[in-house]
Amino acid sequence: MAEVYSVSQLTAYLKNLVEEDPHLQQIWVQGEISNFTRHSSGHQYFTLKDESARLRCVMFRRESQRLKFLPQDGMAVTVLGRLAIYPKNGEYQLYVAVMEASGVGSLYLAYEQLKQRLAEEGLFDQARKRRLPVLPRKIAVITSPTGAAVRDIIRILHRRYPRVDILVIPALVQGASAPQSLVASLDLIGRLPGLDLAIIGRGGGSIEELWAFNDEHVARAIARCPIPVVSAVGHETDFTIADFVADLRAPTPSAAAELSVPEINKLREDLGAMESRLKNLLLQTLEKKRILLSKAATYPDLVRPDRWLALRRQQIDLAREEMVNRIRNKLEGKKHSLLKKIAKLEALSPLATLTRGYSICLREDGSVVSRAGQVKPGEEINILLHQGELCCAVRKVKEEREG
């Protein structure tokens, strides 16, 4: 019968096999940093990856203190270390002694380029972001239906505001098909009535696992969504393109649920306090009006309105008398002025000359005769007097000689 090994025995055998290989104890490895974590102890944990594989790495505090730069996700580096197997979980990992930066990783570069391009288009502008509804009636949650994130969101929404309706729209949140699935779910929101708010996201993970939320098509689907969108992707330190496009970025899915609805007990307390303030304000206003009414009841004009009316009647009579006097004086002035003008006209009138014994001689055609030569003997003329008119015939014409 073949020998049977326990898990511990097999792991110990492989550990010795790996750690006794001198080639694996001083080895240079190049890759892109992913899922970088700096522990409070000073140790650094991260993953090195390329297009087809990943390698877990540990860099202890002593080696980390010699670094001249701070490692970040997406950074391409070259490391020197020894390969070993960690028995507790049976995984092999690289214990890094030296790290050198070798450029920016492809995923990080793609992320930064897309971020800059969408920012230049205005998709991240604060002016286009919408405010969340104060009391949403129905919330759509776009995430994996089997993940812990959806359970946390539902639990917190029901705890904070039980009256809200929750519609879970299943979607893939990682993998090659995830962007297309997320876009389809976001576009579905526009065809569903009654939705007030959407939450899109997933729990934490590596940069590769969160990469679907850095997709350009997903970003544009969030931007054109007809209702406000809350992005809740990963942990507080994770930032994706979806976070910048969304109307609000929540650090975690649980935080997204808390930001989306009010706490109903707090809401009741606030409403109660507002009701009390409103009642007090109303009572204060009524008391002020009562005091004013009491004061008004003592005013003489209200106590004896007949006196007030008598005073007003007297004022009206005086005003009428004053108005009549003003009109009379004005008419007298106009009359006096008119008489003076009439006197001037009468002084210039030819009729006034007739009163002094003069007369006006007119021909039959009405023209005035001012010279004797204007008429001939036998011609009839009319002579206007102060009173009456003479119709005469010319017997003889005597013209005054010149010189």
Image (spheres, grey):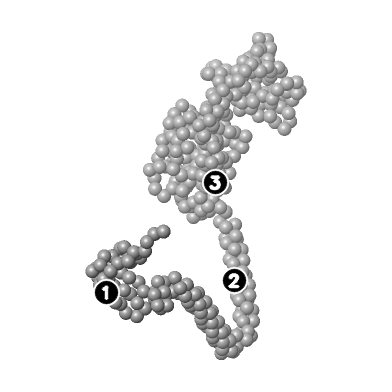
Check disc 3 and give the amino acid type.
Ala
Q: Which sits in the foreground, 168 or 216?
A: 216
- Classify 349 as above or below 97: below
- Classify 131 as above or below 374: above
Check disc 2 and give the amino acid type.
Leu
As helix, strand or loop, the secondary structure at mark 3 comes to helix
Q: Mark 1 or mark 2, which is nearer the start of the sequence?
A: 2
Q: x and y percent of residue 299 in the render? A: 63, 84
Name which quarter of the figure residue 314 lies in: bottom right
Residue 282 is labelled as: 2
In the picture of the structure, the residue carrying the numbered disc 1 is 392
Residue at position x 67%, y 24% from top? 71
Residue at position x 61%, y 37% from top? 236
- Eye-nearest disc, 1 or 3: 1
Check disc 1 and give the amino acid type.
Cys
In the picture of the structure, the residue carrying the numbered disc 3 is 257
